[in-house]
Image: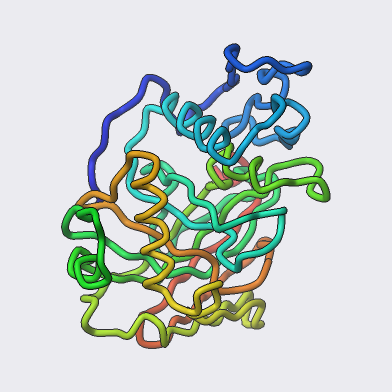
């Protein structure tokens, strides 16, 4: 379903003892003391802010993200938007991160809390691209490049220790905290008006979160996609045929716990998944 991209020298799914070492940046605290064991060890991560050199900018944070993901040997399958409500964490604008094949899970799959530090629940819409997005982009050619649309649940990980001091540049630098993404059955774009989609998430039969597609700073899904295309282009990147994009949480902040989840997207479909404790304990 998704595009194939260049593989990198260290497999993302087995990021054992990952250490980021950016010696070109001078700082009182070494970067390798700030980012260790990020995905494989599943531990709290110190904020990058204390390790940032003077004048550390959003562009520096994206430089760090690109260096960070270049170490993964995994298939890049798409992108995610975050902070799309346009406020919080001192953010000047929404942010984006990259998504990889090892993060994907099937509908009706099992999710394990032992894979997370602080697992969250985000109700999203996924856009699956049939063609490369050509720049300069217009709404018309952007819509024409989208092949399918699907319900999606992102289960990101808020893995930082000091959440009260979390800054948007920390979030950018560590790829906007991806962990798991579940994508439901896709349908043709012409079958649904994406801006009318509503989602209701239930846990063990009790409603725990709701969201609407227009719950972003633009009040419009297509404006979110256009923003991402522009940001990627400014960094020298492009959405490719086969990629998918999730456009940001439609719901407010929510965390997951053990049990069965069902997320109803109305005419767009349904996603179900089960949250367990530790995978090893069940084998």
Front residue (pair 86, 118) = 86
Q: Residue at x 63, y 26 (%)?
A: 37
Task: Point out residue 235 in the picture as x, y percentages from the top left corner.
Answer: 39, 40
Q: How many circles with numbers are drawn on the protein?
A: 0
Report the side of 72 relative to 55 (left or right). left
198 vs 125: above or below: below
Quarter occupied by residue 171: top right
Task: Point out residue 132 in the picture as x, y percentages from the top left corner.
Answer: 19, 53
Q: Residue furthest top?
A: 23
* Image quarter in which the C terminus is found: top right
Q: Residue at x 58, y 41 (%)?
A: 58
34 vs 195: above or below: above
Task: Point out residue 38 in the picture as x, y percentages from the top left corner.
Answer: 61, 32
Q: Residue at x 21, y 82 (%)?
A: 190
Task: Point out residue 239 in the picture as x, y percentages from the top left corner.
Answer: 28, 50
- Colour convention of the picture: rainbow
Front residue (pair 175, 109) = 175
* Image quarter in which the N terminus is found: bottom left
Front residue (pair 198, 240) = 240
Quarter occupied by residue 108: bottom left
Quarter occupied by residue 20: top right
């Amino acid at each position: 379903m998704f595009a194939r991209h260049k593989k990198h020298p260290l497999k993302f799914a087995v990021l054992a003892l990952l250490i980021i070492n950016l010696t070109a940046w001078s700082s009182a605290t070494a970067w390798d003391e700030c980012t260790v064991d990020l995905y494989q060890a599943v531990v709290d991560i110190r904020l990058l802010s204390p390790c940032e050199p003077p004048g550390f900018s959003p562009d520096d944070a994206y430089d760090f993200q690109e260096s960070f993901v270049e170490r993964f040997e995994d298939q890049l399958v798409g992108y995610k938007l975050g902070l799309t409500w346009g406020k919080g964490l001192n953010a000047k604008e929404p942010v984006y991160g990259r998504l990889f094949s090892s993060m994907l899970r099937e509908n009706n799959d099992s999710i394990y809390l032992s894979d997370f530090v602080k697992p969250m629940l985000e109700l999203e819409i996924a856009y699956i691209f049939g063609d490369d997005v050509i720049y300069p982009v217009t709404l018309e050619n952007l819509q024409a490049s989208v092949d399918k649309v699907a319900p999606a649940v992102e289960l990101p990980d808020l893995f930082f220790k000091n959440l009260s001091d979390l800054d948007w540049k920390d979030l950018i630098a560590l790829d906007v905290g991806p962990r798991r993404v579940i994508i439901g059955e896709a349908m043709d774009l012409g079958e649904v008006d994406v801006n009318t989609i509503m989602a209701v998430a239930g846990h063990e039969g009790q409603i725990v979160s709701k969201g609407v597609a227009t719950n972003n700073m633009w009040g419009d899904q297509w404006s979110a996609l256009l923003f991402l295309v522009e940001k990627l282009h400014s960094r020298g990147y492009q959405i490719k045929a086969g990629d998918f994009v999730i456009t940001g949480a439609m719901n407010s902040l929510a965390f997951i716990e053990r049990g069965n989840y069902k997320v109803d997207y109305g005419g767009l479909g349904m996603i179900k998944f089960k949250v367990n404790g530790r995978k090893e304990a069940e084998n």
